[in-house]
Image (cartoon, helix red, strand yellow):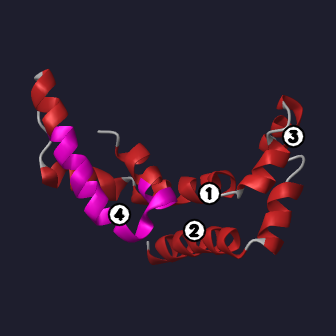
Amino acid sequence: PPALDVSVFLYIFEPLRALELAGKYHEYLLEHLKRTGTTLLTKAEFDESLELYKGPGIAIASLFIFLTKLPLPYLSEILISQETFIQFALGRDYSPALKALQEDVSYRQAVLDSLQRAIHYYSQT
């Protein structure tokens, strides 16, 4: 199952509703599997696979949040050209994101929340 992708998505966009949304995803997955005649995945199997990939999902989400939650004015600085995006993606120029961390409370909180989630998860394992 696509447990890693689901986990990453949940922890980027809806960490507070992760369990609820994972249940909905499983319902839709079952409907799709029935239509295609594919072997069904029980809820227990699905939950087990999500638990297995929870840590990597949280860690990857923390990396993605740095870009996906970047407010539009700062994101626009990165997307001006292919070159500016490549510089950002390769870690050569994080200045728009660093400026957003200083100036945008919502962005800063999203990044901090994701890092706290990762620290909490990995300190418990």
Q: CA distance from mark 3 to mark 2?
A: 24 Å
Name the kind of residue labelled 4 in the image: Ala
Q: Is residue 29 above or below residue 44?
A: above
In the picture, the quarter occupied by the N terminus is top left
Residue ID for mark 4: 18
> Which label's residue is closer to the chain start, 1 or 4?
4
Lateral position of residue 96 relative to residue 68, left or right: right
Give me the residue at 80% from left, 55% from top: 74
Lateral position of residue 73 relative to residue 34, left or right: right
Lateral position of residue 92 relative to residue 28, left or right: right
Span colored in magenta: 10-30
* Disc ID at residue 114: 2
Name the kind of residue labelled 3 in the image: Gln
> Which label's residue is closer to the chain start, 3 or 2?
3
Q: Position of residue 106 (x, y in %)?
A: 65, 72
Q: How many residues crowd around disc 1 within 10 Å: few (fewer than 14), some, or many (20 or more)?
A: many
Lateral position of residue 47 relative to residue 66, left or right: left
Q: SS of the residue at dot 1?
A: helix
Q: Residue furthest front?
A: 73
Residue 14 lies within the magenta run: yes
